[in-house]
Image (tube, rainbow, N blue to C red):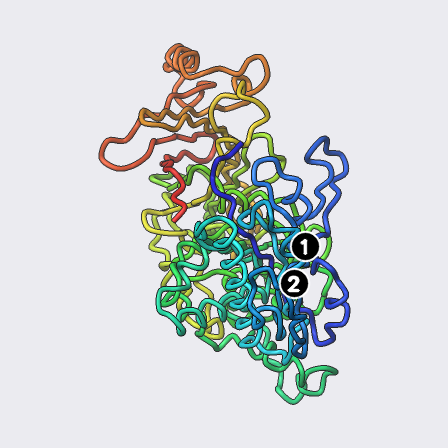
Amino acid sequence: MNDVRTRPLILVRGFGGLDIGSEQANAYQGFNEGTVYPGRRGDNYIYEGFLLRALKSTSYRYTDATNVVGYYSSAVTSPGGDLDGWEETETSGTVVIDHQVARRVLREAAAGTLWVYRFYDLSPRSLQRYGEGLVQVIGLIRKAVERDEAGSFDGVDLVCHSMGGLVMREALLAMHKDAPGSAAELVHRVVTLGTPHRGIAFQRMPRWLVDSLPGAKAGSDELESFSPESTRFLELEKAFPVERILTLVGTNYRSYGVGPASVLNRLSSLFDEGTLATNRSDGLVKHSAAQLPGAPRTFVHKSHGGPDSVVNSRETYEIAMRFLHGTHKVSLWLEGAKITRGKDWFGNSEFYFGVSIKPRYVDFELFHQSAEAENCYGPFAKDDLSDDLPDLATELRKPLAEPGDRTSGWAGPDRLVWEGWVDAGAKPSDSAPGMVFRLDVYVGERDVNGIGFSDNVIFRKQYYVQAFPGVDAEFFLHTGEKYLVGRNARGVEELREVAAAEAHLGTKASVQRLPEIRTRPGWYLDVDGTGFSGRMRVAIAANRQG
């Protein structure tokens, strides 16, 4: 059982379209929809949806508080009488506490509650109104926690899909305007799922055409919020620490059910990259639009909506829960590299580097890069991958509409590949030693002249990193699962012996004990094979919950 505090969690859905009737009729705003994964077994077979999985969790147990607050397009009056300590102003209006439901649902613990913010029940349809409503909800939750748990409120967590992230932004800005610094106190951490922070790339159609669509007048403010020319996203860093916002970026545009959106995203690539060869979106939102400068990010190979998307896939749940509750933060850098094949003399080759991350006992990735996802680092011209790529945070500060997309550079300084959150308690039993995650390393090449091939694989190999965190932390690199699971699982002392016995094999050893770096945080791990050799650095730190 993870002893990290479970804070109130608010789920905020995305853009419902111009006709929002179906969204208003959806009880849990789509967060109750899950996915079936045929051919898998156990926990990996049926994913029952974010909301139900959270309610069933044994590690981070939530209580459904959806009916505690009601949302109305026009103000309702207070029932009066004994309101169980709530004020009349809190039991009347458009965002209203139901004191009787609150008494029943919140009597055990208000902190570990789960709320669905139904902003589409409010009117008028504007981001400002939606943001104000979210501020009201957080205020009601704060009062519930403080009165039931003796002043222990330390913020809520938010998981926001698509436009829900823009609603979150407006709420944080409103808090900051009302009381500078309050947003960071009222909100703990945020996860955004495919949110168009920097707009929608193809939101360039003539205004008269947009206004002619049914329902366009009512939803005009929402449509305007998707403008690729806006830089309002930059104001967020003034109100809230962006390092506490994890941006989850979908990469599978092929499975998105709205064909015209994918076509328009491909056309937008013509303006940015001078080619129609890439799409680089989740089907609706560009990779570069779903990120914020200075905020951590992760990639999942899911679409913006539909079955098994960023809103209803297990990847989303696993990643969000590790960010909100995980025990450790892991960082991975590329220290050095050497490509030893490819670069045909008759072509114009460029190289790409990517890594995918999967933790043990979860059949889903926490981070995904591949040629298919179109999100690897690069392009590189040098065979040591030392090209001076543009700084990602700097590029993300520009409006999306600015020509050119130079956001495929490293995730941070020193060629940062990945930073993510893991949970030492996420294992079936204490007999599974350490924390383990798999690295799938990929190096590819394409010929931009079209003379050679556009999909050459220079190198691809899987490694398993096993960490034993603590004061005297140790890391081991495995080339297979032999010593990681079942009866063959080994502890630290046994792994040291195996690594020492195979030390003469170098990178071909089944287990390597990674050397700790004295001059900087982390441990070196070497990868080597036909066509490529490289050195990476991995570091682990306790997950700061502030």
Tell me: 94 left or right of 233.
right
Tell me: 389 left or right of 96.
left
Q: Earlier in the sequence, mark 1 or mark 2?
A: 1
Residue at left 67%, top 79%? 74
Instruction: Report x, y in % for residue 333.
Output: 37, 42
Could you tell me how many numbered marks the image carries?
2
Say which residue label 1 marks.
31
Q: Nearer the viewer, mark 1 or mark 2?
A: 2
Secondary element at image label 1: loop
Instruction: Report x, y in % for residue 446.
Output: 52, 51
Query: Which residue is at the front of the view, 340 or 412?
Result: 412
Which of the labelled discs sits on residue 98, or is there none? 2
Within-10-Å neighbours for mark 2: few <14, some 14–19, many 20+: some
Which of the labelled discs sits on residue 158, or is there none? none
Instruction: Report x, y in % for residue 1.
Output: 54, 31
Instruction: Name the residue at the left extreme.
Output: 519
Instruction: Report x, y in % for residue 260.
Output: 70, 69
Within-10-Å neighbours for mark 1: few <14, some 14–19, many 20+: many
Q: Is residue 508 visible?
A: yes
Query: Which residue is at the front of the view, 204 or 451?
Result: 204
**Amino acid type at image mark 1:** Phe
